Amino acid sequence: NQLSETLFALGEFEAGVQLLVEALKQKPGDVQTLKHLASIYQEAGKEEMARAFWQKVLKLNPEDQDALTVVGQMT
């Protein structure tokens, strides 16, 4: 989501996260949004939250290479 990217770039972490969470309420199984949230949390140093979102990605798509790679590096 381009607006969330802009918010993060402006240092509006919570507003960007909230926007993505709202997007997930509309499309709960949207892997791209889950991956975006996971990446944002990881970049912010919030490893537990990042891992939780990467795990959700893997639950929906066990073969997702991005998630497999990142989770493998986190352990």
Image (tube, rainbow, N blue to C red):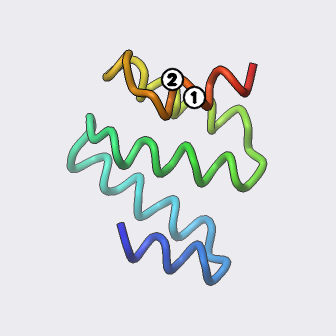
The picture places residue 46, in percent across and down from the top left corner, at 74, 44
Q: Look at label 2 and name its amino acid.
A: Gln
User: Rounded to the nearest whole Å, what is the CA distance between mark 2 and mark 1?
Assistant: 5 Å
Residue at the extreme left of the image, as rendered:
26
Tell me: 38 left or right of 75.
left
The number of numbered discs placed on residues in the rendered structure image is 2
The picture places residue 60, in percent across and down from the top left corner, at 32, 22
Q: Residue 52 has which mark?
A: 1
Which corner quadrant holds the C terminus?
A: top right
Q: Residues within 10 Å of mark 1 (few under 14, many from 20)?
A: some
Q: Residues within 10 Å of mark 2 (few under 14, many from 20)?
A: some
Residue 47 sits above or below residue 24 on the image? above
Label 1 SS: helix
- Name which quarter of the figure residue 8 lies in: bottom right
Tell me: 13 left or right of 18.
right
Q: Residue 25 has which mark?
A: none
Q: Which residue is mark 2?
A: 55
Tell me: 38 left or right of 61.
right
Label 2 SS: helix
- Which residue is at a point 33% across and 38% down the rendered structure image? 31
- Which residue is at a point 37% across and 18% down the rendered structure image? 63
Residue 2 sits above or below residue 39 on the image? below
- Which residue is at a point 59% across and 54% down the rendered structure image? 40
Residue 24 sits above or below residue 28 on the image? below
Q: Check contact, mark 2 vs mark 1: CB within 8 A.
A: yes
- Which residue is at a point 60% across and 78% down the rendered structure image? 9
The picture places residue 57, in percent across and down from the top left corner, at 41, 29
Q: Look at label 1 and name its amino acid.
A: Ala
Residue 44 sits above or below residue 59 on the image? below
